[in-house]
Image (tube, rainbow, N blue to C red):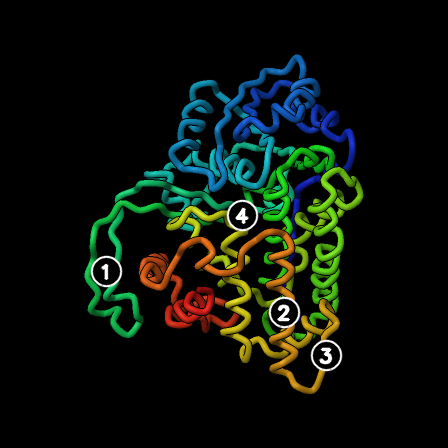
Amino acid sequence: MLNFEYQNPTKILFGKGQIAKISHEIPSDARTLIVYGGGSVIANGTMDLVRKALVGRKLYEFGGIEPNPDYEILMHAVEMVQKERINYLLAVGGGSVIDGAKFISVAVGWELGDPWEILNNHGKGIRNAIPFGCVLTLPATGSEMNQHAVISRKNRQVSLPSASGSSQGNAGAMSMQSSIESEKLTFSNNKVFPQFAVLDPVATFSLPKKQIANGVASAFCHVIEQYLTYPIKANLQDRFAESILLTLLDDGIKSYQEPEDYDSRANLMWCATMALNGLIGAGVPQDWSTHAIGHELTALFDLDHAQTLAIVLPATMHVRREEKKEKLLQYAERIWGIRGDDHDAVIQQAIQKTVEFFESLGLATKLSDYNIHADQLPEVSVKLLKHGMTGIGERGSVTLEICEEILRTAL
């Protein structure tokens, strides 16, 4: 196991009725802005419970934070925070709303020019953040208990390398072109850990099955990115990761099939949180190349985040099967019960089981299922090159050429 430090200051309030306790977590004299998404939290009664818990407080509301939270919309919230002298944020919704609150909390006090630089700098340079908590309504991203956020910016004029420079071998001769593009970037900083997070499984009962499927797949892939690398004798971390994967195969599927089964929904919710709160990744190598490719697919083709992961992960397993051989064989045996002397056959069966798992959730596993074809892949390569995704993965060995091979395999 590698040397590591682990810190997580987020307080979890888990279970039925926990929303009522948020009044004990937010200062009584705070000027609180509640941020939320498209209105489902109002329709399912969650917002009423929040308002009831905070009755008598100075409250403001900002709705309309959409999946893949958009920079321009979030900047309107920043203006509201500044105008109303807001000093506390409460995110009520899924990971996108929580990510949006994280960005708002640091953009308000950003002093180094355009707040989009927070994303370009991956969170470096952040000095101050408005404190915030969250009420989670969609188990998926783990944003409720980590310091990461993903923000999109639509219709932004950018300079991109030309498609003729998409190969690393030609990078020195590439030209630049101006284009109107969407971008999806991440940032991390310890100042954006939520102070508290309410996880009430009942708040997820009304979610569409598609969103639950996305949540199960996202959590699964978050674990895989920290598990399916190479062995370093981190036995406990491996077993932690495997326990989450196995629970997702059981309770994730059941939660998808039986929307109001409290116990399965509760287990799914805790799996999604534990998958990305830093615990299973402490002291082990991490990959994240599937996410890097997936983010570009989302930005270019407006696919859901989980949809891209279900496409890219099996292709990554296939293309990098030799590099990941030892852990793929472990994954095959411990998660799927597949073993045998023919290692290639074992790995292929494990990849197929992974595909079948995603498809059992109604998720497609090929780019062509979304009408994305080979002639569009250079667009992805251009964006990967622009964002420096040319030596990624747990060993820094995933070059642009390997990314392109993964994309071709995913067709």
The residue at 66%/12% (across/down) is: 56
Q: Earlier in the sequence, mark 4 or mark 1?
A: 4
Query: Height in image: 304 above or below 396?
Result: above
| Mark 2–mark 1 distance (CA, rounded to whole Å) | 40 Å
Q: Quadrant of the N terminus?
A: bottom right
Q: Position of residue 122 (x, y in %)?
A: 44, 50
The residue at 75%/31% (across/down) is: 18
Q: Confirm or deny contact between disc 4 and disc 1 (CB under 8 A).
A: no
Q: Earlier in the sequence, mark 4 or mark 3?
A: 4
Q: Secondary structure at mark 1?
A: loop
Q: Confirm or deny contact between disc 2 and disc 3 (CB under 8 A).
A: no
Amino acid tagged 2:
Leu
Q: Secondary structure at mark 3?
A: loop
Label 2 vs label 4, nearer the camera: 4
Q: Which circle marks residue 367 in the picture? A: none
Q: What residue sits right under mark 4 in the picture?
A: 148
Amino acid tagged 4:
His
Amino acid tagged 3:
Arg
Q: What residue sits right under mark 1 in the picture?
A: 162
Is residue 88 visible in the rendered image? The answer is no
Q: Position of residue 291 (x, y in %)?
A: 50, 57
Q: What residue sits right under mark 2 in the picture?
A: 2
Q: Which circle marks residue 339 in the picture? A: 3
